[in-house]
Amino acid sequence: MTNKVLEPTIISTDPGIDDAVAIAIALGDPVMDVQLICPIAGNVSVEKTMLNTRLLLTFLGQSTRIVQGSRKPLLRPLKDASGVHGKTGMDGYPFPKAKVPVDTMTPAAVAMHETVVANQQPVTLIGIGPLTDIALFIHQYPGDLKKIKQLVLMGGALGRGNLGVLSEFNFGTDPEAAKIVFNSGLPIRVAPMEVGRQAKILPDTSEKIKHIGKVGDMFYALFSKYRGGSFKTGLNMYDALAMAMILDPSCFTEVETHVAIETRGELTAGASLIDLKGYLGKSANASVAVDVDSKRFESWFVDAISRTANL
Ligand code: RIB
Ligand code: CA
């Protein structure tokens, strides 16, 4: 057993099949002390992301605090990604009835504040869905920001998007929230879409996952319904890369750079301008992964899933 100091952690998430993998990896890690999970609307409605979080934690035998997140972006309508994750948002496996409760009365930003003040240590904040609740937390509790160790995000695109021509789903669903986040001064690290596509889970790795106990069997069943890639061409486990940036950062090449979010463009709202060449002349506000050792990531991924099997 590690004698490393536990890291208090909060996850804002929209499960979502790749979110489910990322959440399970976080819960299975001996150092990451997940104290709060805030399911938000994104891949599917907030009702479904809440239920999926409860189903997953019940399956894993975990009782982490779950607090409902926002049901829509700050200003814009929600366009979900059920085409990628299935109608339920986590299609493919007959989960046992959800037993873990969810708090639908406390606003997610308040729960984040409660978690930060309850810890002596700085808190790691992870955003693997739209950034609405993280933006609300930043806006309502500026005094807490000095106690945020790091904010690690899956989102943005170095080039073309997967929500719009230039917008990636997480940042593009709520551009105003993303802009608040990148203007906050927090220590931000970003796993953009391209590193997710570079580190696909290839067929032989999916086969290894399949045989990692009931957890592996469950994830393999979800993978069979996931449309973010395929068994044959490789699966884009986007959100797991945010966890890998924290748990095995040596997989990545990160660059300090300026990230700006377009919010006013009639055709380009939601675009993440990851300004590697400094065209905007602005100081760095994030550390962005621009490359990933996909072999190392895949080996880490299998080990991380194996750890969840021992929960
Ligand atoms: O663009 C990929 C991101 O959008 C991932 O977080 C996926 O779960 C979806 O939310
Ligand atoms: Ca997600």
Image (cartoon, rainbow, N blue to C red):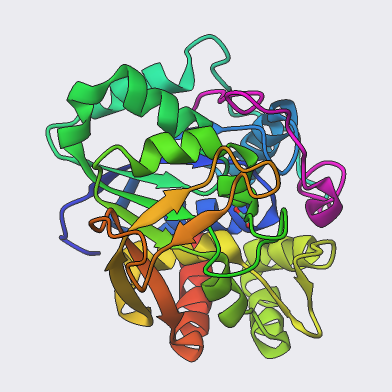
Q: Is residue 14 above or below residue 133?
A: below
Placement of the N terminus among the 4 image quadrants: bottom left
Magenta span dominant secondary structure:
loop
Q: Nearer the viewer, residue 211 or 196?
A: 196
Q: Is residue 88 magenta?
A: yes
Res 197 → quadrant: bottom right
- How far across and how far down the image is residue 131, in percent? 50, 38
At a point 50% along the width and 90% down the height, the residue shown is: 295
How far from the left and from the top, in percent, is residue 223? 76, 66
Q: Position of residue 182 (x, y in %)?
A: 36, 44
Q: Is residue 185 left or right of residue 195?
A: left
**Relative to 58, 25 lies left or right:** left
- 90 w.r.t. 219: above or below: above
Identity of the residue drawn at 79% across and 62% down: 226
In the image, residue 81 lies in the stretch drawn in magenta: yes
Left or right: 256, with 16 as reference point: left
92 to 181, vertically: above or below:
below
Which residues make up the magenta segment? 65-93
